[in-house]
Amino acid sequence: MFSKVSIPLDIPDVQVLDIETNKRGDYVITVESSLNSAICQRCGREISKFHSHDRTITLRHLPILGHAVYIRLRPKRYECPHCSSKHHRKTSTQRLSWYRPKSPHTKAYEEQVLLQLINSTIQDVTLKEKLGYEAVVGIIKRSVTPRVEWGTFDRLDVIGLDEIALKKGHSDYVVIVTARLRDDQVKVLAVLPNREKATVKAFLERIPTRLQRTIHTVCSDMWKAYINAAKEVLGAAVVVVDRYHVAQKYRAGADKLRKQELKRLKRDLSDDEYKTIKGAMWPFRKNKAALKPHETELLERLFAYCPSLKLAYDFREKLTAIFEKDLTKTQATDAIKAWRQAVETSALTCFDPFLTTLDTYLDEITNYFLHRDSSGFVEGLNNKIKVLKRRCYGLLNLDHLFQRLFLDLEGYALFA
């Protein structure tokens, strides 16, 4: 039977002097540095003339067998012969690689806390680790940058611009800027405080020139400020109005007519007749290819009462089919113009708002057919932000929101 177990501390450049247990059952391990030099904080040179010890510091480290572990150390101070004068000695504290100055934890312990924060909450981690709220926030601030580090990128490829409301039901939108790289990795680049053109433009201008040249597509919704800012700063990039937002527009026109017609039919039909078309909303919203036989029959009964609704449904499906086809930009432009002409020839007015959209954004809409880029990756990130907001009871600090997003997206790769 073993009476002793040897467990490595995984902290370099120290030797253990003592191990004791405190009243709480925590292990307190006293160590000293095995290095005999430091870097002068004034001139940056290596210095080796020992001067004294600093006060003792105690740093929390990774647990051992369920017990908290604390490392106790008296940092060495060294005198710099280059910066010292006859009457004034310049000294610098030796800094070891396994902890940060002014941090009460080792780097290894802070990385463990960050791992626990991924897809979790600060409150949960404080309970598990018996840490204060501000201690966990401090770990985030020390370890996760609140802004993008451009040096970690070789290229950006596709940029996405989209907004999200920080508070549900409010109009305090922030802009989420993301990049989709060639290997389909999604990276968060910024959380901007508002949707104004000047704000978006200023951020795009801060992207290093070498990376601006690698951006071939900017995906956006129909917010004019995004489009104009992208065109002014990234003139060589193609601006694409996202297919999802385009579909929202023309589908909204058909759905508005559905609501009007069902309201009319409920007034004009008998109760027994109306029951035969009850529940038609969901089949109407489906694409034709996704309909089940009983849903097709339900729509046919509805369309028998309302031919204009069938016409709107067919127009909606025809436009969707154009986006599904493998067309060039020119072919798609011609197909959409032909669709538009057919709509204008019909008696329908439900698509009029969308036709106005086509007047403004046809070029950006048909840019989709160049590379079939869309903001799907941005929408996916927005869903993650919504979950993060619910999980963390609202995140109003933009720096902290960026840090938590970065941690959720990159944390396992960085700290696992």
Image: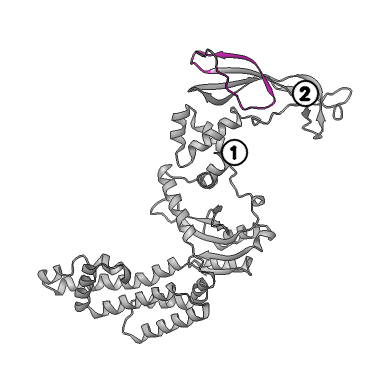
Above or below for 344 versus 36: below
Which residue is tagged 1? 143
Label 2 sits on a secondary structure element that is: loop
Q: Magenta region, mostly helix, strand or loop?
A: loop
- With 360 as the anchor, is 249 left or right in this view? left
The residue at the point 19 percent across, 77 percent down is 305
Label 1 sits on a secondary structure element that is: helix
Image mark for residue 36:
2
Expressed as whole percent of the image width and height from the top left, the position of residue 8 reads 60, 24
Q: Residues within 10 Å of mark 1 (few under 14, many from 20)?
A: some
Q: Quadrant of residue 344?
A: bottom left
Above or below for 290 versus 93: below
Give the quadrant of the C terminus: top right
Residue 326 visible within the image: yes
Q: Residues within 10 Å of mark 2 (few under 14, many from 20)?
A: few
- With 272 as the anchor, is 258 left or right in this view? right
Expressed as whole percent of the image width and height from the top left, the position of residue 252 reads 35, 69
Above or below for 285 versus 44: below
Q: What type is the residue that disc 1 sits on?
A: Ser
The residue at the point 17 percent across, 70 percent down is 266
The residue at the point 71 percent across, 29 percent down is 95
Frontmost residue, 193 versus 333: 333
Q: Is residue 17 magenta?
A: yes
Frontmost residue, 395 versus 188: 188
The residue at the point 53 percent across, 37 percent down is 114
Q: What type is the residue that disc 2 sits on?
A: Asn
Expressed as whole percent of the image width and height from the top left, the position of residue 397 reads 51, 45
Q: Earlier in the sequence, mark 2 or mark 1?
A: 2
Q: Which residues are magenta?
A: 5-26
Q: Is residue 285 magenta?
A: no
**What distance separates the C-alpha of mark 2 from that of mark 1?**
28 Å
- Give the foreground label among 2 and 1: 2
